[in-house]
Image (cartoon, helix red, strand yellow):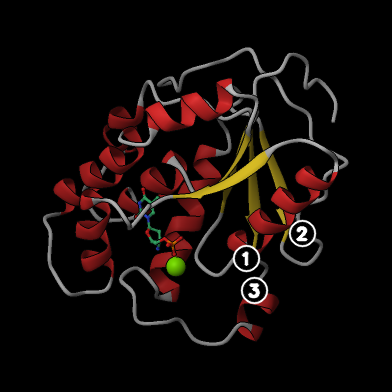
Amino acid sequence: WLGMAGKRGALIVLEGVDRAGKTTQCSKLVQALQQSGRPAEMMRFPDRTTTIGQLIGAYLENKSDLEDHTVHLLFSANRWEMVPLMKKKLEQGITLVVDRYAFSGVAFTSAKPGFRLDWCMQPDVGLPKPDLVMFLQLNPAEAALRGQFGQERYETSVFQRTVQQRFEQLMKDQTVNWQVHSTLTGVGESSIKLDLHCSEMRLE
Ligand code: NYM
Ligand code: MG
């Protein structure tokens, strides 16, 4: 664990298209961290348990329709409402492993027609900036093995291909500490390098 000086926890985000295996890798990472004696907890976005999260959940399950800008802002609000808790935990020295963050917010909404990347990024400006963002790369062979998509909104191959392209655009941002991992090998803990100096998301 290079560069993890001081006692604040690290903010580690896992990103990727649907079915990339983020949830599994998040749990493994939390376990590995805990076993190495570092307090770690998992979080996920959207957090469907809050009032805002329930609106998002109904939308994703196709039980309600929401206007595209509106739901984008709800996803962002769902992150903002967790910021006080996230900051508290990080200050307590707890490392947070987060299943999706603002990058999913931008990648999914900007995959819809008529949405510009910079508009999509704006509501998340000022969120705690991750020390590391691990992008889980789902290769086509593996995707085929994982079978058909479920019933949730966005779960079509056509849409996911566009989402993947948006993620690739976002990964060009050199101010974000991106690391690409294959779903086949998963997230190894050896290669994690952390920079705990930056604190807020910016708009580049
Ligand atoms: N999603 C997730 C968004 O569209 N915007 C966001 O800001 C976030 C965090 O929600 N298809 C999408 C990506 C997924 C869906 O996520 C639900 P999950 O991890 O399957 O619960
Ligand atoms: Mg899903």
Which is nearer the N-term, disc 2 or disc 1?
1
Quadrant for the C terminus, please: top left
Q: Residues within 10 Å of mark 3 (few under 14, many from 20)?
A: few
* Callout 2–callout 1 Cβ contact below 8 Å: yes
Q: How crowded is mark 1: few (under 14 residues within 10 Å), some or many (20 or more)?
A: many
The numbered dot on residue 21 is 1
Amino acid type, callout 3: Pro
Q: How far apart are marks 3 and 2 (CA)?
A: 16 Å
Closer to viewer: mark 3 or mark 2 = 2
Where 69 falls versus 129 (above or below)? below
Q: Position of residue 171 (x, y in %)?
A: 57, 38
Relative side of 113 to 184, left or right: left
Relative side of 63 to 96, left or right: left
Asked if residue 120 can be seen in this view, the reply is yes
Badge 2 is on which residue?
186
Q: For the residue labelled by badge 2, is the local secondary structure a helix, a strand or a loop? A: loop
Quadrant for the N terminus, please: top right
Badge 3 is on which residue?
140
